[in-house]
Amino acid sequence: MTDDQFKSLLDKGTVDVIVRDDLETKLKSGKKLRIKLGIDPSGADLHIGHMVVIKKLKEFQDLGHHILLLFGNFTGQIGDPTGKTETRKPKTQEELEKNAEHYIDQVSKILDVDKIEVVWNADWLSPLTFADVIKLSAHFTVAQMLERDMFQDRIKNSQPISMHEFLYPLMQGYDSVALKADVEIGGTDQTFNLLAGRTLQKAYGQVPQNIITVPILEGLDGKIKMGKSEGNYIGVNEASNEMYGKVMSIPDNLILKYFELATNVTLEELDSLKSQIESGANPRDLKMRLGREIVALYHNESAAKAAEEEFVNVFRNKELPEEIEEVCLSTESWNVIDLISECKMVSSKSEGRRMIDGDAVKIDGDKVFSIEDNVTLSKEGKLIQVGKRRFLLVKLG
């Protein structure tokens, strides 16, 4: 393990390393470590914010360590309360396992999935007896649980906290006991749950796992965490042109953070990029490189080059895309919100309303100013544009 690999592993794209001295000793020993990442597959699609932690797993995989990709087909039925203002709606085990299949396909863009161990926590959590759960609970206090920010917020707002939500960190911690994890990786919002693993491993006579937390990546608005429900995400499975165009829309102050968390640039390159920004480099040029890096990571170099050329043609030269998808609908008259939602040009009707309010929807080049507007389709078609990158020719047929 080179000094550069060591520094990148522990410093690039990380927030906390617990306990750093201990982990450094383990890494220098040459021992093959068991690296755990737990995922509750509550949805089917991943975005590049999810992939920050996957990229950290990839670094461990490249160094020869054993990757444990844990899917919460038990915990996911309960739901992690982290960051939630209300109790989450439960998922069925069948829904979770189907979503997990899609997850594996998407993380394969980064990880060598043939060389990881996929595990399911229902295998050891389902057989626990009520006595076992009481034994687990005895290692934590109610005061510890209530210290969590999201529970404090709910108490202040008179929102309910269900008893089962107190048990979630215990279950995630017990996962580490069952897997004998040496290291667990997660976002900063998972710190409490990750530390629960250390507590329970110690109680069960194991060496407590080390922890690496990674930052939460803000979405395209630059304000809140990336998320599909907010419409501010870059999807792992999105087309290369869409992915590139979205990168070009991020706020300038996020350029360096996206390079660090969403690409494979080295620490040395990050220092150079920081210097360029401080020296007044054109943000557009830096974002163009960022777009190429991200598209190449999830597609390939030729797709990245083509996406950049398309972006320049459409937005710098004010031309239409060379290829515009067509769709035929049997209904002639549509409310504009219903139309763009039906054509999946927005993730929800709420996003559609936001786009119209922001003057970001056009029909045949004319802006749509009201959510009450109607569209009459013809066999020749209507050119619908949502945002700067989404075009669709909608025909009656």
Image (tube, helix red, strand yellow):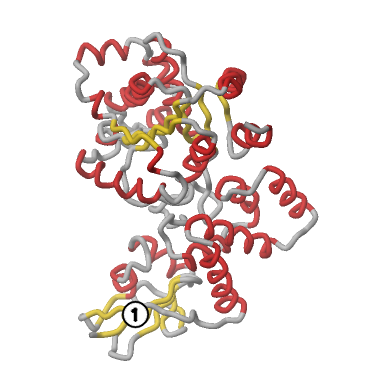
Label 1 is placed on what type of residue?
Glu
Query: Is residue 153 visible in the rendered structure shown here?
Result: no
Q: Is residue 217 above or below residue 39?
A: below
- Is 373 left, or right, of 332 in this rendering? right
Question: Looking at the rendering, which quadrant does residue 160 occupy?
Answer: top left
Work out which quarter of the rendered image holds the N terminus and state it: top right
Q: Secondary structure under badge 1?
A: strand
Picture coordinates of residue 85, whole percent (x, y): 37, 37
Q: Is residue 94 above or below residue 169?
A: below
Q: Nearer the viewer, residue 362 or 285?
A: 285
The residue lying at 38 percent from left, 42 percent from top is 114
Query: Is residue 75 visible in the rendered structure shown here?
Result: yes
Picture coordinates of residue 379, whole percent (x, y): 28, 90
Question: Looking at the rendering, which quadrant does residue 122 occupy?
Answer: top left
Q: Nearer the viewer, residue 117 or 71?
A: 117
Q: Nearer the viewer, residue 38 or 180?
A: 180
- Is 326 left, or right, of 30 in this rendering? left
- Specify the farthest residue to the bottom: 380
Q: Is residue 138 above or below residue 107?
A: above
The residue lying at 24 percent from left, 27 percent from top is 123
Q: Nearer the viewer, residue 288 or 26?
A: 26
What residue would you read off at disc 1? 326
Picture coordinates of residue 99, whole percent (x, y): 28, 47
Picture coordinates of residue 250, whole percent (x, y): 57, 58
Work out which quarter of the rendered image holds the C terminus and state it: bottom left
Q: Is residue 349 above or below residue 212?
A: below
